[in-house]
Image: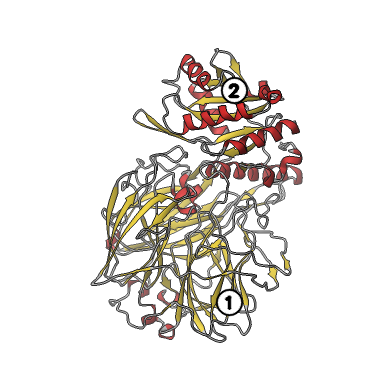
């Protein structure tokens, strides 16, 4: 369902050169008739177990969707460290959906440091084929940091179709106020951002997306030929389709907050391709957690970071404190430059903060929490036991690779790691677009980007690899990101994945296995 | 070498077409063999609006649905336009889809429909040109099931799902013919 469009009184978007942030400025907008921000239904653990049945099926538009208790919705799952999730997952999708693959599905519990073995967070062999089901038992590590995680399908080749159309839900590990007492009692909002395709031909949308990418590559090459090398090509701030990002299911929403009130927003980017660069013009945000882990959980880091905007790559999460403005103010996503052949991420207005006099319904941050000591993430990580070089690559035919290999479910592990250790990975992006590096089961610290030390290291599980750069004569210099990857927890023993979380890249091969011993 | 992209004329506005509109791209080659053993290239049909569907003759789901709709589409066109559109059926099951099987299958829907096959290499090239994916599950094949619409200059213009309303395809084919 689409709410009435916002009336943009004046928007000025600057040229979007370079990588990452694209500079933009916007004058506040007014909403003509946006919906009130939807609050997702919740499944809260009881007696140490969060139990639910989730069904995958096509909706009335022919798009794959999650159904829970008869409604098309993905509930937010609330658990405590040490709990279990018992999830009965039913696949009611048709045998095929016109994509060249049987409509398989499964689930990944993104960001959790949990076992990658069945019946837990295993995505390589686990499959709920059409007409069948699978019973997941996922144990939340007693040491799992409190914050926002999520669950989504992970069938190789179909992740983009399933996630991009909306098969995803939020998962909150409770207890953040035990680490940041100032959050106790604040109203909190779970916000899920998506960018569902809006093509009139639902199944053909996947095919169309590949053609759009092909056209971007052709335009980039043509521009390179014309300017002798240069950066050329790319229109990151110009929409390619009619698709409209959504915030909790609608294009724009009013978000109730009293002037001066502090609220905790837990924001999940559940889109397959789109980056969000969130900002509330005129206000700074207090970032308290990223990818589920409180900022202060990294030894020596502050409790929070004060920022003007927050970039959330596909699959990323950000938890930040917002202060209610004195007058209605927009929530915007700035244009994000994902590189000359990357998906365009133009500026968009997602909502408007309005005074609700404290009455709109939403949860409050729980002040009761338990977390077992010592908290592993807070212990300074040991020096890296291993150093690896990882290359993210692609070709003009739409194939994607890591270290020259395109993912196959039957391929052996690319790396074998030892639990109890950390490793330093230098990840190189040899392409002309951003890739959202993600590791299952573990988090990492970003030590440096293109040789520049990260001034604010903290734990993450998804991070953008900037596109390579081009000299005027056309020579390309890959970008590099240096990571310290945390394999300390022995619960991760088994085989799991790392990949680009731009899901069509993942589906086309930009993924590999890690075996933790 | 710069890629020359043809301008696509007044139908560029995506709201005027009913399917998923594609960006301008160089024309695909589609070099295969037709059901009369004659070498085929998409350029042979320049000046004609072309519909392409990838499927297989044992298919019981999307293929008969799409082909039935495409036959209805052609019947719905004004008589003067019926020979200005060609429907191509490209096999994704070359092992079982002989030329005679393709001919019998396509003619069952409409005598002007053309079945196409080729060597494994030629077919893989065609699949790549059209971003077609296919995978086998026993004798059952899963395959991309988009209906591709190509204008008289050989450019891919839009995609439909196999269950798309016939009226929209008819309207767009008529528009492309009148624009050619």
In this rendering, the answer to whether B152 lies above or below A2 is above
A382 displayed left or right of B115:
left
Picture coordinates of residue B11 (x, y %)? 72, 40
Q: Nearer the viewer, residue A398 or A347?
A: A347
User: Pointer 2 indicates a residue of which chain?
Assistant: B
Res. B32 image quadrant: top right
Q: Which of A294 and B20 is in front in this view?
A: B20
Q: Which residue lies at the image location 66% right of the left edge and 73% below the top edge?
A: A30
In this rendering, the answer to whether A35 lies above or below A218 is below
Res. A222 image quadrant: top right
Picture coordinates of residue A360 (x, y %)? 49, 79
- Say yes or no: labels 1 and 2 on the same chain: no
The reply to whether residue B69 is visible in this rendering is yes
In this rendering, the answer to whether A428 lies above or below A261 is above
Residue at the extreme left of the image, as rendered: A47
A50 displayed left or right of A29:
left
User: Pointer 1 indicates a residue of which chain?
Assistant: A
The reply to whether residue A403 is visible in this rendering is no
Cα distance in 3D space between marks 1 and 2: 57 Å
Res. A116 image quadrant: bottom left
Q: Residue at label 2?
A: B31
Q: Residue at label 1?
A: A353
If the image is split into quadrants, where does the C terminus of chain A sit? Answer: bottom left
If the image is split into quadrants, where does the N terminus of chain A sit? Answer: bottom right
């Amino acid at each position: 369902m689409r709410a009435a469009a916002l009336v943009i009184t004046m928007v000025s978007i600057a040229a979007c050169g370079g990588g990452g942030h694209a500079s933009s400025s916007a004058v506040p907008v007014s909403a003509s008739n946006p919906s009130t921000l939807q609050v997702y239904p919740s499944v809260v653990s009881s007696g140490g177990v969060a139990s639910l049945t989730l069904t995958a099926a096509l909706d009335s538009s022919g798009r794959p969707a999650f159904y829970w208790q008869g409604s098309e919705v993905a509930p937010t799952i609330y658990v405590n460290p040490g709990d279990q999730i018992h999830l009965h997952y039913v696949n009611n999708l048709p045998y095929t959906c016109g994509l060249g693959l049987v409509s398989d599905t499964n689930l990944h519990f993104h960001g959790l440091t949990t076992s990658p073995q069945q019946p837990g967070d295993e995505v390589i062999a686990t499959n709920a084929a059409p007409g069948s089901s699978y019973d997941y038992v996922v144990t939340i590590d007693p040491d799992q940091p409190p914050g926002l995680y999520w669950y989504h399908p992970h069938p190789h080749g179909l992740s983009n179709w399933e996630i991009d159309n909306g098969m995803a839900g939020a998962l909150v590990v409770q207890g953040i106020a035990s680490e940041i007492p100032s959050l106790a009692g604040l109203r909190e909002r779970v916000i899920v951002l998506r960018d569902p395709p809006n093509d009139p031909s639902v199944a053909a949308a996947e095919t169309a997306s590949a053609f759009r990418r092909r056209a971007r590559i052709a335009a980039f090459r043509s521009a390179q030929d014309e300017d002798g090398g240069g950066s050329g090509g790319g229109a990151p701030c110009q929409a390619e389709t009619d698709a409209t990002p959504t915030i909790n299911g609608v294009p724009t929403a009013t978000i109730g907050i009293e002037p001066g009130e502090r609220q905790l927003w837990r924001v999940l980017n559940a889109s397959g391709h789109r980056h969000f660069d969130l900002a509330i013009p005129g206000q700074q945000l207090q970032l308290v957690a990223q990818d589920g882990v409180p900022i202060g959980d990294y030894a020596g880091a502050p409790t929070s970071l004060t920022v003007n905007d927050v970039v959330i790559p596909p699959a990323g999460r950000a938890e930040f404190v917002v202060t209610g403005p004195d007058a209605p103010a927009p929530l915007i996503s700035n244009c994000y430059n994902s590189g000359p052949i990357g998906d365009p991420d133009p500026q968009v207005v997602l909502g408007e903060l309005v005074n609700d006099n404290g009455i709109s319904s939403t949860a409050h941050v729980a002040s009761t929490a338990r977390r077992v000591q010592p908290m592993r993430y807070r212990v300074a990580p040991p020096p890296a036991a291993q150093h690896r070089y990882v290359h993210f690559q692609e070709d003009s035919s739409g194939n994607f690779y890591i270290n020259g290999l395109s993912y196959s479910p039957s391929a052996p592990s690319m790396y074998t790691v030892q639990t109890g250790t950390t490793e330093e990975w230098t990840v190189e992006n040899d392409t002309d677009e951003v890739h959202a590096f993600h590791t299952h089961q573990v988090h990492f610290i970003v030590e440096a980007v293109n040789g520049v030390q990260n001034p604010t290291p903290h734990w993450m599980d998804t991070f953008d690899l900037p596109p390579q750069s081009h000299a005027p004569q056309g020579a390309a210099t890959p970008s590099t990101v240096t990571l310290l990857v945390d394999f300390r927890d022995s619960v991760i023993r088994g085989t799991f994945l790392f990949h680009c979380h731009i899901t069509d890249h993942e589906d086309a091969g930009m993924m590999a296995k890690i075996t933790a011993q | 070498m710069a890629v020359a992209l043809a301008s696509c004329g007044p139908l560029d506005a995506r709201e005027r077409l009913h399917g998923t509109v594609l960006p301008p791209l160089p024309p695909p080659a589609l070099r295969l063999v037709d059901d009369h053993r004659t070498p085929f290239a998409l350029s042979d049909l320049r000046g004609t609006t072309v519909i392409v569907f990838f499927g297989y003759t044992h298919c019981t789901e999307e293929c008969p649905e799409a082909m039935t709709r495409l036959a209805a589409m052609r019947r719905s066109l004004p008589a003067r336009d019926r020979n200005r559109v060609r429907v191509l059926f490209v096999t994704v099951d070359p092992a079982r889809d002989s030329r005679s099987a393709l001919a019998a299958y396509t003619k069952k829907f409409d005598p002007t429909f053309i079945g196409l096959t080729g060597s494994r290499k030629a077919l893989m090239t065609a699949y790549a040109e059209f971003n077609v994916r296919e995978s086998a599950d026993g004798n059952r094949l899963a395959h991309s099931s988009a209906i591709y619409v190509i204008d008289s200059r050989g450019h891919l213009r839009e995609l439909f799902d196999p269950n798309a309303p016939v009226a929209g395809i008819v309207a767009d084919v008529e528009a492309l013919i009148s624009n050619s």
